[in-house]
Structure formats: structure tokens, C-alpha cells
Image: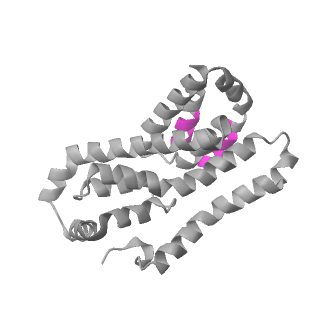
Amino acid sequence: MALALVVAAVAAGVALGPSQATAWDAAQAHLAGWRAWVDHNLLAALAGFYLLFGCAASLPFPVLTVMTLIGGALFGVPLGLVASCLAYTTGVTVSFLATRVLFRERVRQMEGKWLSRVQRGVARDGAYYLLTLRMMPTVPFFLVNVLMALTPIGTRTFAAVSCLGVLPYAFLSTRVGAELASVDSPNDIVSPQVLAALAALALVPILIRKVIVRGGAPEGGELK
């Protein structure tokens, strides 16, 4: 319970504070205690992490980076990656369904050109369009949830593609969290393993953008 409360406080700090980097700095101060607690309460820790990440991902909070970092730091790469992807997918799917139930019909009644363009694009190749957006960490995932809820895309397709799209970024971010959690002193941050993980994480948006552009997606994700 103590771990859940502290992680919840960090998640709230992400939403209300200036940046995810600040929240991660705050989380690092508690990592040693958290990891000791996790060692003796693994199932409870996983359940708490899943619920907190899932709830935060269903709301317009920029928690993807900091929560995947925490997942890697607490559980390591394989387990942290699975927990993060499942929690993220659950959260964004709940947001998607809530928006669809509450607003889809109302928006359809006021349908304008912008929604028509999205509808046509999703009807043509909706899964690819969603995958493109999910693989770009700079695109707010809550906005993607809302937009997709107003289109004909199916719930299963939305959930599966969202999980697949976040996987590369979540893997690298979880790896960074696991590496940083093993740092004993500030000087160890410049170790080759940590630098390699950070460099890979920083290159993800650039590489994804190049792949998407070469694949024929319009610049900026704009539908034609």
C-alpha cells in the first residue's frame, strides 16, 4: 500500500508538474525502498502498478515515459515491459470506449470536414494510421484515443494496434529504467550500458518518422 501511494503521488506530479523528467527525478529518490518492497510483494506491486498506470493512461496525463521507466526500474525489462504494455493498452482502451459512448453520436451530428477526413482515412487503412500515431511518442496518446473513438475502427483492432505501436518505445524506456535503477552513484550514469539505452530511446522518434515517411505516410500524419 505504501508503494502504491508513493507511485500515485509521482503519477500526480507528472500530471501537475512541469515535466516527466522532474517526476522521474522524484521517483529515483524512492527506488531503493520500492525495489526492496517489490522483492517481498511482487504480485501486489504488479497489481498496484497495473492499476495506477492503467488509470493514468485513461486520462489526459503524459505518463507513458515516466511509468515505463518506473516499470523497468521496479520489475526489470521482461516483466516491466509486459506490465507496462498491458496497463497502457487497458487505459487507452477504456478512454477510447468512454469517449465513444459519451460523445460519438453527438459529434456525428455536428460532423464537419475535419471528421470526414479522419473517417475516410480510417475506413481506408485505419489500423496503419493508428499504428503510425502510436509509434510517435510526441503525439499525445489521449488525443489519439478521442479521435479514434469518433471513427468506425473496432475495439479489438484499436487495443491490439495500440499495444503493438507502443511496444518499441516501451521496450527502450523500460530498458532505460532498468539500467538507471542499477546506478549506484552519479558517475555511473555515464556507463556504456546506460548511455546506449538513453541514445536508443532518444533516436526512436527520429527513426520512426523516417520509416513512416519512406513507407508513404503523409508528412505530419495528415490524411488526404
Query: In percent of the image, x 84 and y 39: which residue is there?
Result: 184
Residue 155 seen from this side: yes
Query: In percent of the image, x 62 and y 51: which residue is there?
Result: 173
- In this rendering, the answer to whether 91 lies above or below 137 is above
Percent across and percent down for residue 52 are 49, 33
Percent across and percent down for residue 220 are 43, 73
- In this rendering, the answer to whether 54 lies above or below 172 is above
Percent across and percent down for residue 140 are 45, 56
Q: Is residue 175 magenta?
A: no
Query: In percent of the image, x 27 and y 53: which residue is there?
Result: 149
Q: Main secondary structure of the magenta part?
A: helix
Residue 16 seen from this side: no
Q: Quadrant of the C terminus?
A: bottom left
What is the magenta range? 10-27
Percent across and percent down for residue 199 are 70, 62
On screen, residue 39 versus residue 123, left or right, reads right
On screen, residue 27 versus residue 223, left or right, reads right
Q: Quadrant of the N terminus?
A: top right
